[in-house]
Amino acid sequence: MLISLRVQDFAIISDITLDFKTGLTVFSGETGAGKSIVIEALGFVLGARGDVSAIKDGAERMCVSAAFSSSLLDETLRRELQISGDVFTLRRELDRKGKGKAYVDGRPVTVATLVKIGQQLVDFHGQHDHQSLLHASVHLKLLDQFAGLEKHLHQFLQIYQKSQALQAQLDALHLSEQEKNRLLDLYSYQLQEIENLHPSIDEESQLEMNLPKLKHAGRLLELAENAYEQLYNAEDSATARTAKAVKSLESMAELDDNLAILAQDVKNALVTLEDAASTLGSYKEGMNLDPDALDKMLERHEKLKRLKAKYGPEILDVLNTAKDLQAKISNLQHCAQHEQDVQNELEIVRKKLLTDARTLHEKRMKAAEKLAALITQQIRPLGFNQIKFSVSVEMDEENIGPTGADKVEFLFSPNPGQALRPLKNIASGGEISRVMLGLKTVLAPTVPIMVFDEVDAGIGGETGHLVGQKLRQAAQGRQVLCVTHLAQVAAQADCNFHVAKKASKNTTHVTITPLVGELLIQEISRMLGGSADTQGAAYKHAQELLQQAGRNCK
């Protein structure tokens, strides 16, 4: 589970630490209070895109830290990240210059590593996902996820890429000699530019760690020599004085046994001082004052930045570009081979591609029927009495792409007598919210943490109550975080937080308060449009909602 989250100088949050529990956690508050900022901060620490504009006014950097149960990660990733305890922490920073840092248990990692962790931990459903559900390309991904076709898709992609590479070879055979030479010169120049610098994946982070030490080498050496002198070298150094004290105490201990322990403690302190002096001696001997070394390191760092700007954005992308260039050069250099050989091999691969595309289609057809039935089962209790939901899978063998030859689209009919139509043509905002909730419940059964940012958009009344119950059901055995404006949803939570924004003359702050007892009743009453009046209808309705949810607010 997500154990805690600390947000510092993120948007309008100065410094807030939240502790979480299992089950359904709800964030409520006035519109614009900053409820979604907590969700955005969690996304940031799990690798979502960072933006310097999100740094709080007056701050130099923003930082988000999160603690998770390590049991949420699979054994392979725990071993890769050297996580051995029951809890592990993530931390990510971004300063105003756009420089970011990421850590796992205090060890530097890449943002890509945070993304990999996040994929195993959390499934986010933001407000924009309502619209993404209207696109057929998303439907294909969701169906493949449900069908567990990751391995099949990977194998299919490899065959597809091989067919593309063979087609590129075939096209190269038809190039003019002049065009071949032009491309060879271009690819060779680009490859040489990368190989001359010979970058490594971890090199940039190492440079960023070593540059400050080299920049301040002179001052560090001066301080180290002074400390060494005070500890060891001077006649009245700390070690010399302590050694004299040891001799005196040992003589005293011979006369008074009660001083033996004190004498040993001081003797141990002398050993510690001598060890520290030895370490300082080695440190100052190893200091590098060569200005050329600093210049070379700075030059190297700048060259890496330019290389990333041209072939990146990251060093790994640069290295992948080099591999791609090598393949292109090889194709051009050997394009004089017999065209028929390439054509024959391409035909064999295309036959294999078509066979595998048909296999994918069959698997998708079977999965589509199951998915439609499960989604119908999940969303029918959410105010759809006569719902029809179907997953259309159509194969076009003349248009095979990297994911096969299928076009997938969700079809929907919310009312009796209404024909099935594409979701984008028939569903309202409230209907989309409920369909998405059903999809998330079906498609993310193994993700330990689910996050919903205003999944209740466009709904209310009894339907809101049903959505709240569905969210609470989804939270059984996992953690669900939800931002909501609906009292019916908030009442179903296991834990409630109230988010408020306070503005002063020069700054704006956010407060997040756990709600229990009377505070919780008052917040539910506010969400119903009432006040804190204990005799008001909204207040009594709030009590009823909480009682129906089995929550004791005394």
Image: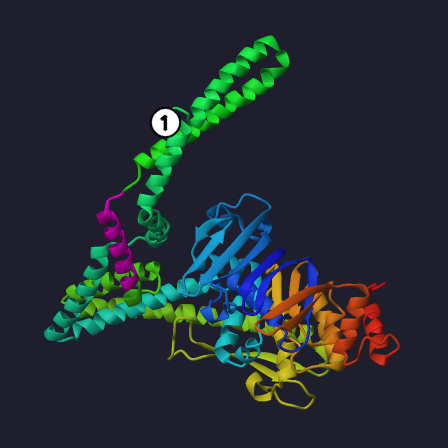
Residue 178 in the figure: left or right of residue 139: left
Residue drawn at point x = 84 percent, y = 71 percent: 543
Residue drawn at point x = 65 percent, y = 69 percent: 482
Residue 263 in the figure: left or right of residue 530: left
- On-image quarter of the N terminus: bottom right
The picture quadrant where one finds residue 479 is: bottom right
- In terms of secondary structure, where does tag 1 sit? helix
- On-image quarter of the C terminus: bottom right
**Neighbourhood count class around disc 1 (C-alpha, 10 Å): few under 14, some 14–19, many 20 upward:** some
Please state the horizontal and vertical placement of residue 127, each as a whole percent of the image: 58, 76
- As shown in the figure, which amino acid type bears the numbered disc 1? Asn
In this rendered view, identify the residue nearer to me: 40 or 251: 251
The picture quadrant where one finds residue 288 is: top left
Question: What range of the chain is rendered magenta?
Answer: 289-307
In the rendered image, the vertical position of residue 186 relative to residue 266, given as above or below: below
Residue farthest to the front?
Answer: 236
In this rendered view, identify the residue nearer to me: 63 or 46: 63
Residue farthest to the top?
Answer: 255
Q: Which residue is mark 1?
A: 233
Residue farthest to the right?
Answer: 535
Please state the horizontal and vertical placement of residue 485, each as a whole percent of the image: 69, 76
Q: Give yes or no for residue 295 being in the magenta stretch.
A: yes
Q: From this viewpoint, is residue 334 visible? A: no
Residue drawn at point x = 54 percent, y = 43 percent: 84
Q: Give yes or no for residue 429 being in the magenta stretch.
A: no
* Predominant SS of the magenta segment: helix
Please state the horizontal and vertical placement of residue 233, each as a whole percent of the image: 36, 27
The picture quadrant where one finds residue 547 is: bottom right
